[in-house]
């Protein structure tokens, strides 16, 4: 039993004609504060219309048509079984999206972006996730690209942005070190002043895609004598520079996902500093906010939920499909409800984006709940698969083809609650900045 495509029908128009009349975009699920106050005073909260505008529905159809025509057969076959995509798959899809101008939905038109509204960006991301297409590497498009737009010089913007957008240059992120993860400001990788250049020595770890990358954006220590956040610089380093070495590690999901990256007397021109020397912490923080809004995984989890329902429907226990057993139905329903609640939170962030608000601490809620739900879905999928969950990519006929991707993805999903700032750290952020609790230090 396959859930029908396109079952998601939620949008964000406001039913209150007064609010519509203010001429905002059609997806304000939250009226402005004054309207809320007025509604409270009159004992009436305005209703909400969770349907997309006709224009946005047209855009969604456009995306679906594009996906049905442009996704190459080889990638579609992998998407069907959730098999991991190789780097060449990712870059092939990057080039296809670039040719449609959709590689970087959030980039403004002045830097070659498509100039989409927040709702269209949301729809595009959701449809790509629902279709299971390769996820483009975020390091250039979502992290260093926007950082260069915000903090870079015009020369840096001209030099780097077009090649990030086209995928000609692949980027990786050099933040974490063996002794600096959650407490990132403790980083020790050192850049010493040498006239027009810095000389960089040290190690980064967990550097995803470093083995493929042309460039790495790094946080380096340029001053050890001041408060630790005050002595950090944001530096762009050419991975082909003499003295850079990336050593890949293999994950339990069988993917060579990340590397230890070493810097041995690497010379980096000072023109590669983004922002000011010793002021890299400001750039780093801006970039982390963008990183976390990526991690709600709503479309991915919706897709996984459909797969779980299908596997449950096709698996028989005691003469009945698992979907007909109350206990299994209950487990699936609980997760589906949690996913629906997450979707609503995602819409709240979207509504804020429509009003021009940058993502705030609420992106930590999306990261926390999105990654937990996704992990629990893979756990449930493994439970439902029973002994089929024990092996993957086995000899023909051992594990049904459509389920072969589940076990490796389950393994890789363990990382969801660690990367992008561990979930414990997200809880600290929520406690301090949303709940107003003391920081505990
Ligand atoms: C798959 C994957 C890909 C990654 N890719 C990259 C990358 O490309 N570039 C990059 O720079 N980094 C990357 N990372 C690193 C990631 O950002 C760090 O793993 C993460 O920030 C946690 O740091 P750590 O591993 O050093 O753990 P630690 O900081 O040592 O934390 C260990 C444990 O202690 C908990 N903890 C720590 N401090 C606190 C606190 N104050 N309160 C409560 N609990 C706390 C943590 O939640 C965690 O459970 C990646 C990680 C993974 C798993």
Image: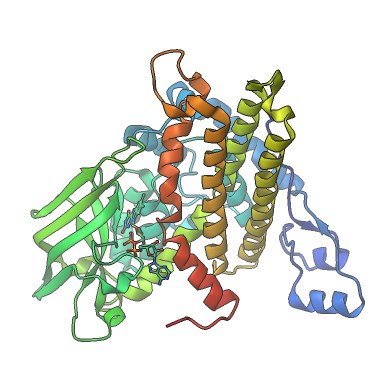
Can residue 11 be seen here?
Answer: yes
Q: Position of residue 183 (x, y in %)?
A: 33, 71
User: How many numbered circles does the render carry?
Assistant: 0
* For residue 264, above or below residue 194: above
Locate the C terminus and report the quarter of the image it occupies: bottom left
Locate the N terminus and report the quarter of the image it occupies: top right
Ligand 1 picture quarter: bottom left
Q: Residue furthest front?
A: 318
Front one among 417 and 220: 417
Q: Is residue 406 left or right of residue 271?
A: right
Can residue 131 be seen here?
Answer: no
Front one among 129 and 144: 129
Residue at point 71%, 60% (across, down)? 25
Q: In this view, does 154 lie to the left or right of 221?
A: right
Q: Is residue 84 left or right of residue 3?
A: left
Q: Where is residue 129 in the image (x, y as percent from the top left)?
A: 54, 40
Residue at point 27%, 80% (across, down)? 228
Q: In which quarter of the image is residue 391?
A: top left
Q: Quadrant of residue 94?
A: top left
* For residue 24, above or below residue 296: below
Q: Residue furthest bottom?
A: 226
Q: Where is residue 34 in the image (x, y as percent from the top left)?
A: 78, 79
Residue at point 38%, 37% (across, down)? 90
Q: Is residue 43 left or right of residue 208?
A: right
């Amino acid at each position: 039993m396959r859930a029908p495509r396109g079952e998601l029908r939620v949008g964000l128009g406001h039913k209150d004609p007064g609010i519509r009349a203010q001429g905002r975009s059609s997806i304000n699920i939250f009226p402005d504060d004054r309207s809320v106050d007025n509604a409270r005073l009159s004992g009436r909260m305005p209703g909400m219309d969770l349907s997309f505008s006709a224009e946005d529905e047209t855009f969604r159809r456009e995306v679906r048509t594009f996906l049905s025509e442009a996704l190459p057969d080889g990638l579609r076959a992998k998407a069907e079984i959730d098999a991991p995509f190789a780097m060449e798959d990712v870059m092939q899809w990057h080039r296809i999206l670039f040719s449609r101008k959709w590689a970087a939905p959030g980039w403004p038109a002045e830097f070659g972006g498509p100039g989409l509204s927040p709702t269209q960006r949301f729809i595009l991301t959701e449809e790509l996730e629902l279709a299971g297409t390769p996820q483009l590497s975020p390091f250039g498009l979502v992290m260093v690209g926007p950082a260069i737009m915000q903090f870079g010089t015009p020369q840096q913007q001209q030099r780097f942005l077009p090649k990030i957008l086209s995928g000609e240059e692949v980027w990786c992120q050099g933040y974490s070190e063996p002794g600096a993860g959650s407490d990132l400001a403790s980083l020790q990788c050192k850049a010493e002043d040498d006239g027009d250049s810095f000389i960089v020595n040290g190690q980064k770890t967990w550097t995803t895609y470093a083995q493929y990358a042309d460039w790495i954006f790094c946080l380096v220590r340029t001053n050890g004598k001041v408060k630790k956040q005050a002595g950090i610089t944001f530096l762009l380093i050419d991975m082909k520079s003499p003295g850079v070495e990336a050593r890949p590690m293999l994950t339990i999901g069988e993917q060579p996902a990340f590397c230890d990256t070493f810097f041995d007397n690497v010379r980096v021109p000072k023109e590669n500093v983004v922002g000011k020397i010793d002021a890299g912490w400001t750039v780093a923080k801006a970039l982390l906010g963008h990183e976390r809004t990526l991690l709600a995984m709503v479309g991915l989890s919706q897709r996984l939920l459909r797969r779980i329902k299908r596997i449950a429907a096709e698996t028989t226990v005691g003469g009945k499909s698992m979907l007909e057993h109350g206990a299994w139905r209950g487990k699936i329903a609980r997760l589906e409800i949690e996913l629906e609640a997450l979707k609503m939170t995602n819409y709240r962030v979207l509504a804020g984006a429509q009003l021009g608000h940058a993502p705030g601490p609420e992106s930590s809620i999306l990261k926390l709940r999105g990654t937990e739900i996704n992990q629990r879905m893979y756990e449930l999928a493994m439970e439902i698969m029973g002994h089929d969950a024990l092996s993957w990519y086995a000899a023909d006929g051992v594990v049904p083809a459509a389920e072969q991707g589940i076990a490796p993805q389950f393994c890789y999903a363990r990382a969801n609650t660690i990367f992008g700032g561990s979930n414990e750290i997200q809880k600290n952020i929520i406690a301090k900045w949303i709940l107003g609790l003391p920081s505990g230090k």
